Image (cartoon, rainbow, N blue to C red):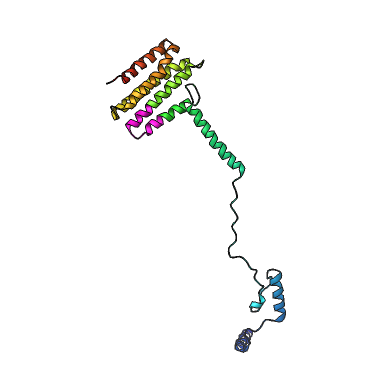
Amino acid sequence: MGRARERRERVLEHLTDLPRLPLGGAPDPAFRDRLRAELVTGPITGPITGPITDELLPERSARPRHAHRRPARPRPLLSQLAAFGLAAAMMVASFATYQAVPGDSLYPLKRAAESALVGLSTNEAARGERELRSAKARAEEVASLLGSSNGGPLVGRTLKDMEESTRAGISRLRRAEPRSPKIKKFARHQQEVVAPMLQQLKRDQLAQAEGYLDYIKGLVAPG
């Protein structure tokens, strides 16, 4: 217990002497020199034991407020060529699809596009005109097939598709525009295209074409 009392008395003495001790003060000259050298050459590695004034800090290097933005990098030539090549390939594919005839690999795509255009038409008259365009395309395809060596079996099928598109288009157009001059104009065009084919058709195909021409003549006749 005596030792503990001595320690308490010693602590009280130190606490009593604290107000008389000097506070702060200027830093030691050796500390100032060491701190300046460390600030200039690298990061501080030891604890700072004195107040830091402005004279101890290194001069700040002047920096621009706004850094210049890096200019946009131009697109590589390879990517530009690839984009151009893709666009060209799409144009060629579209043209090849439009030129496809029965038997070609792209022909189903051509017919699907025609059907989609008919369905997307805004009214009955527009749908009728789309059907008549398809009928014109079938007539041109028949002429192309007659000029090829392997088009025989496809001619009859194409003639049938031509007649179906014609009847569907005329029916739609008559409902929307009963006295439309487009009907007679279409009929005259089909006569001029189909009539020269009769001499090249086989017996069953000839019967199809003649029946189609009879139907067309009724559209041209005044009524």
Q: Is residue 159 at all visible to an observer of this figure? A: no
Q: Could you say where residue 191 lies in the image, as x and y percent from the top left?
A: 38, 18
Task: Give the magenta part as a residue range.
Answer: 115-131
Residue farthest to the left, as pictured: 223
The quarter in which the C terminus is drawn is top left
Point 38% across, 29% down: residue: 130
Of the pair 212 and 20, the residue shown nearer to us: 212
Does the stretch in magenta take in 123?
yes
Q: Look at the picture and state if 179 lies above or below 159.
A: below
The quarter in which the N terminus is drawn is bottom right
Point 59% across, 39% down: residue: 81
Does the stretch in magenta take in 223?
no
Point 45% across, 28% down: residue: 110
Residue farthest to the top, as pictured: 203
Q: Based on the displayed image, in which of its 4 quarters is residue 64 positioned?
A: bottom right
Q: Could you say where residue 85 lies in the image, as x and y percent from the top left?
A: 57, 36
Q: Could you say where residue 216 lies in the image, as x and y percent from the top left?
A: 34, 19
Secondary structure mostly seen in the magenta stretch? helix
Q: Look at the picture and state if 91 lies above or below 41.
A: above
Q: Based on the displayed image, in which of its 4 quarters is residue 220 positioned?
A: top left
Q: Could you say where residue 67 lies in the image, as x and y percent from the top left?
A: 60, 61
Q: Look at the picture and state if 140 lies above or below 116.
A: above
Q: In this view, does 122 lie to the left or right of 3?
A: left
Q: Is residue 54 left or right of residue 210?
A: right
Q: Based on the displayed image, in which of its 4 quarters is residue 69 positioned?
A: bottom right
Q: Is residue 78 at all visible to an observer of this figure? A: yes
Q: How many marks?
A: 0
